[in-house]
Image (cartoon, rainbow, N blue to C red):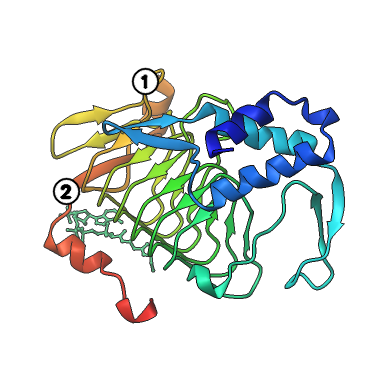
Amino acid sequence: MNPDEVVRALLEIDPTHAVETERDMFLEFLSCLRRGELRAAEKRENAWISNTDVKKAILWGFRAGVLVNIQTPPFDRGYTDKDTLPVRIPTVEEGIRMVPGGSSIRDGSYVAPGVIVMPPSYINIGAYVDENTLVDSHVLIGSCAQVGKRVHLSAAVQIGGVLEPIGATPVVIEDDVMVGGNCGIYEGVVVRKRAVLGTGVILNASIPVYDLVNGTILRSAPGAPLEIPEGAVVVQGSRPARGSHAETWRVHLYTPVIVKYRDERTDAATALEESLR
Ligand SMILES: CC(C)(COP(=O)(O)OP(=O)(O)OC[C@H]1O[C@@H](n2cnc3c(N)ncnc32)[C@H](O)[C@@H]1OP(=O)(O)O)[C@@H](O)C(=O)NCCC(=O)NCCS
């Protein structure tokens, strides 16, 4: 069966009554995700489209799984999780460096050669992490998140998972994006190529982004994610809150701001250290 046929076949089976051969099909599905043959979202004509069947098939595995203690090196005392959701241990041939110290890559995620995963970090099911991306310490790459090539996810970056609602597009970080320390990106936000998120920027579908260069306010809309434009440099800002109480109390709301578009100065500030790779 080709990968799409595996997904279709799975979705016709009741996960709560699946027999061994049907559960094996879920392992084949995880392998397709691991090899990058299936993705939770794909770019078509510059728009990111969620693959709802892939997301449904992932949820199928959660429902079909039963709790077991799994004994797999390097987890000396094993770990306990649903038996359909194993951990994957990268091999030398895969070319991924996973430094020891509490990191996990859940099977059913694609992690390309050249990726470095610093501990502790977690890459969840359905995530796609492309070539030469750096995953620094305390990073979460949530379920189905799509991360491009040569992306720098700095320490403590949190990328939310978007398994449900089923039609929602996962968080997408395109190629050559620099995500500064402590950033949080949630709810299907799309960060276009070469953008830079300064330290501590938080983005979700409800947070408007003020583009001071073009004089526009970027927002999500029903069915359309919040998009950070290519090469935008986003930093933390604030704006006065509305209403008389806010005025009296001088309350400001947190607001991400595009202060500029990437230039040589930004490139210098975000240059990656080749010797670490
Ligand atoms: C965004 C960043 C890359 C700077 O980009 P840059 O192109 O060099 O920005 P510039 O220095 O030209 O600054 C442009 C304007 O934005 C302001 N600014 C820059 N970074 C800012 C930040 N993080 N927060 C608030 N304002 C910021 C500058 O003061 C400047 O405004 P001004 O002209 O009114 O003074 C940098 O601030 C940053 O956040 N880097 C990530 C650091 C990090 O988290 N590293 C993790 C690995 S250790």
Label 1 beta carbon less than 8 Å to ligand 1: no
The answer to whether residue 17 is left or right of residue 28 is: right
Q: Residue at x 79, y 36 (%)?
A: 64
| Residue 209 coordinates in the image, percent (x, y) | 30, 35
Camera-side residue: 5 or 186? 5
In the image, residue 233 sits, relative to residue 62, either above or below, namely: below
Name the residue tied to disc 2.
261
Q: Residue at x 70, y 40 (%)?
A: 25
Q: For residue 256, what is the image quadrant?
A: top left
- The span from disc 2 to disc 1 (Cα, nearest Å) is 24 Å
Tell which residue pokes out farthest to the bottom in this image. 275
The residue depicted at 62 percent of the width and 65 percent of the height is: 103
User: The residue under label 2 is which amino acid type?
Assistant: Tyr
Q: Which residue is mark 1?
A: 221
Image mark count: 2
- Percent across and percent down for residue 195 are 26, 49
Choose between 28 and 185: the one closer to the eye.
Answer: 28
Q: Residue 266: which quarter of the image?
A: bottom left
Residue 117 visible in image:
no
Q: Quadrant of the N terminus?
A: top right
Q: 10 Å neighbourhood of mark 2: few (<14), some, or many (≥20)?
A: some
Tell me which numbered mark, 2 or 1, is placed earlier along the sequence.
Answer: 1
The image quarter in which residue 189 lies? top left
Above-or-below relation of 180 to 273? above
Q: Amino acid at mark 1?
A: Ala
- Check residue 247 in the rendering and tell me which mark sits there, or answer none: none
In this view, the residue in front, 258 or 163, is: 163
Residue 180 showing in the rendered view: yes
Could you tell whether 145 is left or right of 246 in the image? Answer: right
Task: Where is residue 68? Give x, y as percent.
Answer: 87, 52
